[in-house]
Image: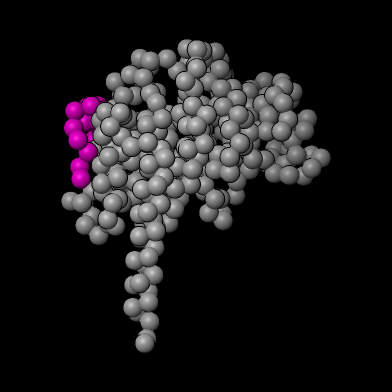
Amino acid sequence: MDSFDTHDVEAHYELLEPVGKGGMGTVYKARHKESQELYAIKVLSKELSRTRVQRERFFREAQTAHSLSHQNIVSVKEVAYLKGLPCIVMEFLQGETLYDQFKRGLSLAVGISRLLQVVDALLYAHEKEITHRDLKPANIMVSSDGVVKVADWGLAKTTTDETGLTKTGLLVGTPTYMAPEQVAGEPTEARTDLYALGVMLYELSAKNTPFTGTLAQVLQAKLKERAPSLIAVNRALPVGLPELVNDLLRRDPKTRPTTIEVNRRLTVILDRLTSRKAREVKETLPS
């Protein structure tokens, strides 16, 4: 993998077309001029480029992702500039976001298999003492062959962070998927990511998130209320799933399960679900 430098990205890459736009900037599909390989180039917007903290956070995303080498984490090749704007050159994924798939509708088995890949990425990152802190369907890419990649590590935090970019007291994350400790501006940890995973499992199962309403209502509910039970919403769920989601959505992070335990329990749930589906298919076949 190339080391980070400050060259003009257009010296080595041909920009083909924009493939996405968000609050941070625009993502382009690009081709390396020599190797002809395709890449994604994420360019920080002009407005955010003027802010030192946003520039540092953007480069932090590149540095964090660059340090994580895992099949379920988007890999970063290098950092460069496009017409004076900071940009990150990443692997190009032919696919869509988990948000797109949630919106269109996913079967429970497929959705859980997707989220198990997210757990694999978290296991790796958490072992390196890195928490994502902005885990949500829009930050999870799914390739055309079903491989999941966790992206957007701009709010990630290490246990040794001393930059001030992730200090306690700042509200960071996306409100719907934000853990209570993030809402309260308290210290975050690995189980902060697991709360977000619990919200996504709830969303997959109930076709809605646990807390709805205005931004203020959602944030207040996270601090004061228990998440609604999944059993009351969907009684057809496999044994163990409502209990796991309930455990992940606990307000106190110390009482949530560990990443290793979540991986084990979710694997058992998926095995149980796929076994049930196989029996149902067998019962419909003529004897």
Q: Residue at x 74, y 35 (%)?
A: 13
Q: Quadrant location of the C terminus?
A: bottom left
Magenta span covers which residues? 212-229
Total marks drawn? 0
In the rendered image, is residue 217 in sight? no
> 110 or 217: nearer the eye?
110
Q: Tell me if residue 218 is in the magenta stretch.
A: yes
Q: Residue furthest right?
A: 34
The colour scheme is: one colour
Instruction: Give the side of residue 284 with respect to residue 148, left or right.
Output: left
Is residue 264 visible in the rendered structure shown here? yes
Asked which quadrant contains residue 16, the reply is top right
Q: Position of residue 223 (x, y in %)?
A: 23, 27
User: Does 189 appear above or below 37?
Assistant: above
Which one is in front, 97 or 11? 97
Q: Is residue 82 left or right of residue 257?
A: right
Residue 150 percent coordinates (x, y) = 51, 39
The N terminus lies in which quarter of the figure? top right
Percent x, y of residue 270: 39, 56
Give the percent coordinates (x, y) of residue 6. Answer: 71, 21
Q: Is residue 128 left or right of residue 1?
A: left
Residue sticking out furthest to the bottom: 287
Residue at the spot 52% in from the left edge and 36% down from the top edge: 124
Left or right placement of residue 225 versus residue 152 in this view: left
Residue under the point 81% across and 40% down: 34
Residue 138 is one of the magenta-drawn residues: no
